[in-house]
Image (tube, helix red, strand yellow):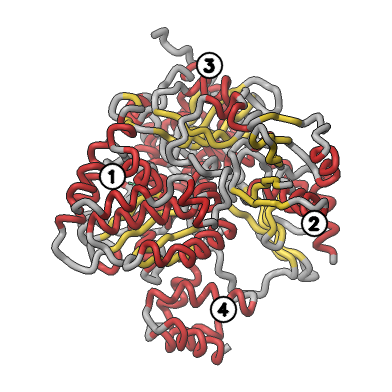
Amino acid sequence: MEEFIAGWTARHGTGRDGLLPLLHAIQAEAGHIDDALVPAIARALNLSRADVHGVITFYHDFRRTAPGRHVVKLCRAESCQARGGAAMEAAAARRLGVAMGETRADGQVALEPVYCLGLCAIGPNALVDGRPVARIDAAALDRIAAEVAA
Amino acid sequence: MKVYVSRDMASVALGADDVARAFADAGCDVVRTGSRGLFSIEPLVEVETDEGRIGYGPVTPVDAAAVLARTHPARLGPVEQLPFFAAQQRFTFARCGIIDPLSLAEYGAHGGWQGLETARAQSPQAVVDAVKASGLRGRGGAGFPTGIKWQTVLDASASPKYIVCNADEGDSGTFADRMLMEGDPFCLIEGMAIAAHAVGAAHGYIYIRSEYPFAIRTMRAAIEASAHLVAPFTLEVREGAGAYVCGEETALLDSIEGKRGQVRAKPPLPALKGLFGQPTVINNVLSLAAVPFILADGADAYAAVGFGRSRGTMPVQLAGNVKHGGLYEIGFGITLGELVNDIGGGTASGRPVRAVQVGGPLGAYFPPSMFHLPFDYEAFAQAGGLIGHAGITVFDDSVDMAHMARFAMEFCAVESCGKCTPCRIGSTRGVEIMDRIIDARDGAPVRAKAADGGYLGKALYSRAPDRVDVSPDAQTALLRDLADTMKYGSLCALGGFTPYPVLSALDHFPEDFGASAPVKEAAE
Ligand SMILES: Cc1cc2nc3c(=O)[nH]c(=O)nc-3n(C[C@H](O)[C@H](O)[C@H](O)COP(=O)(O)O)c2cc1C
């Protein structure tokens, strides 16, 4: 990853405002941002390690551990709740065998909360490996479960 | 044959990609557009005919043959003539759902760039004056006059200056920014280029939340495609990272600067010391996207529509448990009841409407007895709420309002930036209070007896649980006290406005909080 970081700064510069774009790029490349990379990131942008750690831990998107092979982000916000989202959240946890906010023990799937996908008239909604899915019901959960079993 | 299918994220979530593929396989020339904005008819296909574009929806891939034979029963006719669209006043969303969002030719053919041309033929001061005269107020929530903000930046002597577009749209029940960026991205770019001319800025940022991958892709492509038309002004997209508070303007600026998205104390105003400490215009997507119309058609045309001090149109978003949800752009002044019942058609579940939340997670809950309220900044403020980014989330009678109040506190706790104590700690205490209220209401065992020291002394959180008075009255009093502290003590509206949903739920739906008898509203 050190090379990846060097390549990134060669293209995008070493300004501190590059920190979020760099973190996004690392996560897109490696799936998560390992704590072991913090010193290299700090050096690359001339920041303190504490500073970098503080930014990584502030934002919900950045992961410090590897995610599940599949990620289901289920919306918990009001508009989805108005359409039965809380019941679907419980059903999703049962159907996928993993609690909200956790990665299943076999590493196959993570169920993560998200607060609004902007699809608020057709909920409950989710992003399944980045693909938007609307009007989630029991049948949709079955399809999602089959998809993430692969 | 030419057909139109939306590529909007909501349409795709409902299966529009498969529908588009089916029509392409059937030999059609498929144009992918933005969404028209009515989701109960999506996926929607519009077929180009001699009588214009004829809509069919909702359709699935297997319907392609019947649609092309014009025998499909889901025929809607010309979409703009449907009741949902016929009465709209589409100033900002005029092109959305109609054109290919990334076609410069179609954007130009539908009136694009006229606002920028007009602006560039005028002095910066004249452009600022036009925006002032239009009466445009910030669509991100606070409703601050856009022209006055621009004047401050124009008058600032420091350089460089920046234009920042707030596309963080975190409020549940809102999706207008997303729809515009996906459906008519050049309109936003044109608005930002006009702002740049008006205040003397050379570079702009669009900060888009990471939950909007389609919008990020479309905006990046549109920036590249139109770079030669807005030059020397340049633009870039910055992607958020899942923090609601980064929609707050100063937290957003810190986030662009590569820092934790924490709220700054004001003053200094971002207009004077904003991004990288420089004078900065920061506006919502809809504020900036309203500007091309204002310059092209004139400030008077915009200001002619509206209500009181709320001029122009608002792209209202009907969301949640609503039958005909979607985007409804209309002049201010339409009532809440017209929006929810007449246009939205009531609930999707068919049960009675019990509550609507207006303005996202920091907005108040209103009962149907308040549906006479006109959509207007001042009217909503007087009624103890806000219109915010104009999202309306509809709930039917199965909603538990104590649960929604608890959720408001929980959301604040999850999303607090942590800089000020009333928000960071108050929200967590609020969740605990709501848990006690819900326990008491549901007859969970009462754990403690009253102690001395007045209601606060009795009710305050205590490490000795037997000293906590968990009666609904004591906890409700404590909740109001906490809301007061959050409202007046928080650094920004995250902690400051979380009391709106909480207290409006308590005031309008006391029975859900275990109050002995529903409090009758005084007749007006
Ligand atoms: C917690 C919080 C979240 C906010 N989220 C947004 C947002 O997502 N989009 C937005 O335009 N404004 C948001 N605002 C309002 C901004 O602080 C600011 O008022 C707005 O960007 C100004 O632009 P305008 O004048 O065009 O509305 C938020 C404010 C707070 C306190």
Mark 3–mark 4 Cα distance, whole angstroms, equals 55 Å
Residue that badge 1 annotates: B146
**Left or right of B372 in this view: B393:** right
Q: Alpha-carbon neighbours of circle 2 within 10 Å: few (<14), some, or many (≥20)? A: many
Marked residue chain, label 2 = A
Residue B118 seen in render: yes
Say which amino acid is labelled 2.
Answer: Leu
The nearer-to-camera label among 1 and 4 is: 1
Q: Considering depth in this image, is A45 or B354 the residue closer to the camera?
A: A45
- The secondary element bearing badge 4 is classed as helix
- Discs 1, 4 touching: Cβ within 8 Å: no
Say which amino acid is labelled 4.
Answer: Ile
Mark 1–mark 2 Cα distance, whole angstroms, equals 48 Å
The nearer-to-camera label among 3 and 4 is: 4
Report whether mark 2 lies on the same chain as mark 3.
Answer: no
Residue that badge 2 annotates: A96
**Left or right of B179 in this view: B335:** left
Residue that badge 3 annotates: B518
Marked residue chain, label 4 = A
- Tell me: residue A36, above or below residue A148: below
Residue B79 on image: x %, y %: 63, 32
Report whether mark 1 lies on the same chain as mark 4.
Answer: no
Residue B144 on image: x %, y %: 29, 42
Q: Residue at x 37, y 42 (%)?
A: B293
Q: Quadrant of the C terminus of chain B?
A: top left
Say which amino acid is labelled 3.
Answer: Pro
- The secondary element bearing badge 2 is classed as helix
Label 2 lies in ligand 1 vicinity (Cβ under 8 Å): no
Marked residue chain, label 3 = B
Label 1 lies in ligand 1 vicinity (Cβ under 8 Å): yes
Residue that badge 4 annotates: A26
